[in-house]
Amino acid sequence: MELTVSDIRSSIIFNLKKRFQEARINNYRAFVADATHANPGKQFDLIIADVPCSGSGTWARTPEQLLYFEPTSIASFVKLQLAITTNAIQYLKPGGICFI
């Protein structure tokens, strides 16, 4: 089994590499990429896309975040989520599974 991981933020990939090393996970490929147009160069049996969201699911724990929320940002999240999923799905093998 091989794991491929990407994120637009290099700090996330850096932290992931440290955590994988601690967990002794060695068979993976990680790279920094914008998932709206990234090309991993192969197809996958399983894709899990953790797309950006408004963060509203955390407001019960962090109600202060409501102060920074702009309702107009929802449309931009929808556009970004659609772009990421549209790009990701083309790398799914026939019969594969995609979680978004």
Image (cartoon, helix red, strand yellow):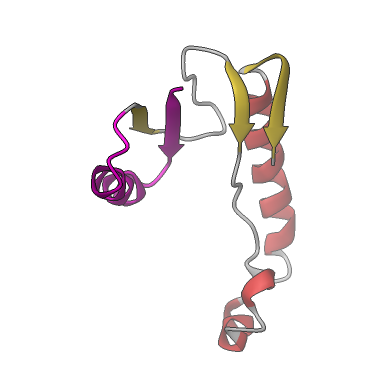
Picture residue at 69% right of the left edge, 38% below the top: 99
In depth, the one of 99 and 76 nearer the eye is 99
- The quadrant in which the C terminus is found is top right
Compared to residue 64, the image places residue 89 above or below, namely above
Compared to residue 27, the image places residue 20 above or below, namely below
In depth, the one of 70 and 31 nearer the eye is 31
Picture residue at 30% right of the left edge, 50% below the top: 19
Compared to residue 7, the image places residue 70 above or below, namely below
Task: Count the labels in the image.
Answer: 0
Q: Which residues are magenta?
A: 1-26
> Position of 80 compared to 75: left or right?
left
In depth, the one of 35 and 24 nearer the eye is 24
Q: Position of residue 79 (x, y in %)?
A: 70, 44
Compared to residue 79, the image places residue 26 above or below, namely above
Give residue 91's quadrant in the image: top right
> Position of 56 compared to 50: left or right?
right
Asked whether residue 74 is drawn in magenta, I would say no
Q: Position of residue 75 (x, y in %)?
A: 74, 55
> Position of 53 compared to 13: left or right?
right
Asked whether residue 24 is drawn in magenta, I would say yes
